[in-house]
Image: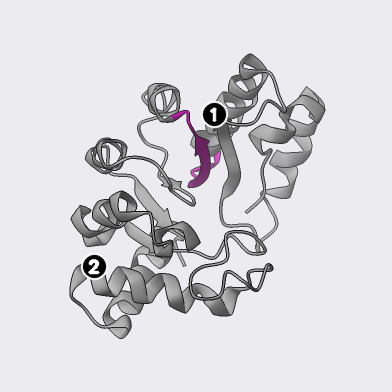
Amino acid sequence: MIGIHPNYSHEAEREHLAQLRALQSDPSVVALGEMGLDYFHNFADRNRQREFFEAQLQMAHELNRPVVLHSREAIDDTLAILKNFPEVPALFHSFTGTIDESKRIAERGYLIGFTGPVTFKKNDALREAARNLPRDQVVVETDAPYLTPEPMRKQKTNEPAMVIHVAATIAKEWGASVEEVDQITTANAERFFRW
């Protein structure tokens, strides 16, 4: 996937959107993203973030592409903007929000991706969110090189092989095997990315 991240939207120019559209024709590109809104960091003005988010959603609509979203402390505004693009499939990448937010995302039919934070000892609410979501709306992710899962947090750099710890946490919450989580979440990703 390729897109303009909200934390870099202050560096983007409108002409970059044409370049982004051209890159979508590469057969290795299967989605637009990571895009969205980030109200936690103050790297980019919120209006500028919204401008590039909406432009990329419009492009996804026109190109019939799924989108991968970054939404940090901005779920309400993200969902409000997505209402204008109901046909665009979305995956909320590296979800760390509340149980209520996960329910509202799921009610709209979007996928939710869980990364290292779901394994952290103090994240009971995040594990509860994962436990109560429809299984066909969950994927596991790495967010490498960031958000290294337990029990590997002492190793600062995350890597894809560590996604097994995320899957094991989801398996425990679901009362399922890691193999079942692998099959379900892989099928969800394949369906979403149209592989």
Q: Is residue 69 magenta?
A: yes
Residue 188: x %, y % from top left:
35, 64
Report if residue 65 is visible in the image.
no
The residue lying at 57 percent from left, 69 percent from top is 153
Sequence-first tag of 1 and 2: 1
Which residue type does callout 1 highlight? Gln
Camera-nearest residue between 74 and 55: 74
Residue 146 shown in magenta:
no
Give neighbour class at mark 2: few <14, some 14-19, many 20+ (Cα, 10 Å). Answer: some
Q: Residue furthest top?
A: 47
Q: Nearer the viewer, residue 160 or 13?
A: 160
Three-letter code for the amino acid on which mark 2 is drawn = Glu
Residue 150 placed where, x, y %?
A: 48, 71
Q: Could you give the CA–CA distance between mark 1 and mark 2, rounded to whole angstroms?
A: 36 Å
Task: Please give the name of the residue rendered at 72% of the width and 40% of the height, measured from the top-left corner.
Answer: 20
What residue sits 32% from the left and 78% below the top?
183
Task: Say which mark, if any, is on residue 173.
Answer: 2
Q: Which residue is mark 1?
A: 58
Q: In the rendered image of this protein, does residue 173 appear above or below residue 111?
A: below
Q: Horizontally, is 123 left or right of 21 in the view?
A: left
> Residue 67: horizontal and vertical position, in percent?
51, 44
